[in-house]
Structures are given as C-alpha cells and as structure tokens.
Amino acid sequence: MSKTESSEMKSWAIVNISVCNLRQSADYDAGMASQGLLGMPVKILNHDGWYEVETPDEYRAWVQGSAIQQVTKSELDAWNHAPQVVVTSVYGFVYSKPNNKSQTVSDVVASDRFKLLGTKKDFYHVAYPDGRTGYLSKKDGEKVDKWRKHLKQDAQSIIETGKKILGVPYFWGGTSTKGVDCSGFVRTTLLQHDIIIPRDAYQQAKKGMHIEIAPDFGNLIPGDLLFFGTRATAQDPARVVHVGIYMGKKKFIHSLGRVRIASFEAKDKDYDEYDLNRLLWAQRILPYINKENGLNTTDHNNFYR
C-alpha cells in the first residue's frame, strides 16, 4: 500500500497533548473555537496544512497537526477498546519513571485519557496516542472501568466538581481546567462526570427541559443550567450569551472573569445584579442524559465506541 493510500485511510485522529487549541479557521491568528483533551477522538473532515475536525460534541474547528495523532478507524477502535486511565486531578504530570522526581513527559488535566499498559508501585504505566509512554500517579487518575462503576452524576457531586476550579481564569474558547469560558466551564465540569453536552451556551440552551424561572426561583433545583443574554422583542428572538450552573438557594457557579459563585439574593456578599438583570431561563438536563440527542456519556457516544 502506498503512503498516499495509507494517509487517505486515516480519517480519524486522537488528541495527543494535554489540551489542544481548536480554532475557527486554519491559522494561528484565528479566534479560539474550543479545545480538545488528550485521548479525545476527533473525525478529520478536511486537510489543508491544518486539519478541520469534528469533536464528540459535534463541534467543527481547525487544529494544527502536531497536536493530534492520525489513525485509521481500526486503530481508533483499538484505542477506544483498550484498558484506559482517566485523569481525575485538576492538574498533574506524567513522568518518565515511576517517580515524581523523574523527568516529566507532559502535563495533564482533568478528563485526559491514556491507554493503560500496567501498574508499578503507586503509578499507572500509560501510553499516549503517538506511542510515547510514561507514569501517572494513581492519586491523579483511575482506571476508566472502575471510575465509571462508582462515578456519581447527581447535581451535588457535579457542583462540588465545579467548585474545585474556583478562581481559574476565564479563557475564551477554553474547555479545560487550565482555563474556561462560560459554556466551557459547564462542559468541563460535566465531562469529569463522563457527560458530554454541546459546546456553546446557545446550543446548551436547547437541551433538556425548558423552565421559565419563577420570581422566587422556587421551581429550580440544583444542577439546572441558567442562561443569560438579551430578551426577545417583537422583532428579534432572545439571544443567549452566558450560562452557569444553579446551586440552590439563589446561588449559581459560572465563569465570568474567573470561575466564581454568584447570588441573586441582594443581601448576599456575592450578589450579582448584572446577571440577574440579563437572566433568561433555565434548562434541566441531568434527567435527559443518554435520552436526548446531544446529551450522552462517553460510552454512548459514537466517537468513543
């Protein structure tokens, strides 16, 4: 088989660095669209120096080739079906030896995934999509099969995960624990519970059950997504520009400047009048995971199967 024929068959890729930037067009100067995480499968749509790819949440953007490992469908299947380790710490490192004083191979962030080669002492022996190997501390990750068995997907657990990155800076296009925009915060938090949702706030605002918010917020429950923006007029529909996660008791957590907790209660120190004035509606999504298109766990997502 010629090199060209082999290359043409590699219509998939796997993210090969801790966090890769996905841009709006094939240029370093192009705006950020989203990010991909190590071990994430992407489908190659076009190649013109850069690669146009589709992510598991059906988002399309451009990525520089050094950030991904091109694979055939059979190679992707082998990756997906091999024993894997998922990073559960907010941030960490892979080391060249089972010793955290040895040379680092790379950094890692929450939800990165590796192929599991074995264990040694307090470390997992792991492989990258490009074949590099290293050692990840067991305190920073867990075998995916075991992780799924005890993983909680209730609202309180998800909120506690979101609180782990309080203070992390707002980063336009960010979807990792290094930095997040508003919808990226929601996506990053839920992915740590194995839940994939659409990338952008306006897309998230169409999922699950729509809720017109009562004046006293009494019809909301923790875990509901809150949407903010410009209200509809006779001429124009509502425009969603921001999202956060409702915590209960009129509080919510979101990324605005940094990941922070805010309140709709005027007496609270975290009172957020600005967002109260642009609050639109809520969506209840957790009961609809794996029941509605675009809301699924990785084991129900075609990119991971």
Image: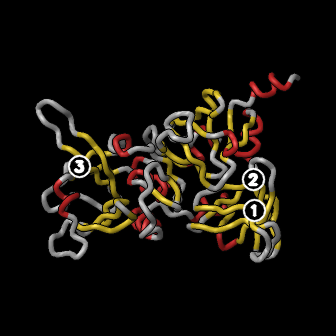
Sequence-first disc among 2 and 3 = 2
Taking the image as shown, residue 26 lies to the left or right of residue 243, namely right
Q: Position of residue 249 (x, y in %)?
A: 24, 69
Q: Amino acid at mark 1?
A: Val
Q: Quadrant of the N terminus?
A: top right
Residue 35 in the image, given as x and y percentages of width and height? 54, 48
- Relative to residue 92, is residue 190 depicted above or below? above
Q: Which mark is residue 118?
A: none
Q: Nearer the viewer, residue 181 or 55?
A: 181
Marks 2,1: beta carbons within 8 A:
yes
The residue mark sitting in front, 1 or 3, is 1
Q: CA distance from mark 2 to mark 3?
A: 42 Å
Look at label 3 and name its amino acid. Trp
Q: Residue at x 39, y 64 (%)?
A: 258
Quadrant containing the C terminus is top right
Residue tagged by mark 2?
A: 128
- Is residue 199 visible in the rendered structure shown here? yes
Residue 281, numbered label: 3
Q: Distance from label 1 to label 3 (Cα)?
A: 45 Å
Give the colour scheme shown: secondary structure
| Residue occupying image coordinates x 87% and y 22% | 2
Give the structural element (helix, strand or loop) at label 3.
strand
Relative vertical location of residue 94 with respect to residue 268 in this rendering, above or below: above
Front residue of 257/153: it is 257
- Identify the residue position indicated by label 1 in the image: 105
| Badge 1: residue crowd in 10 Å (few <14, some 14–19, many ≥20) | some
Q: Outermost residue toward the front? A: 29
Q: Secondary structure at mark 1?
A: strand
Viewed as shown, does residue 87 lie left or right of 235?
right
Q: Residues within 10 Å of mark 2 (few under 14, many from 20)?
A: many
Q: Nearer the viewer, residue 102 or 231?
A: 102
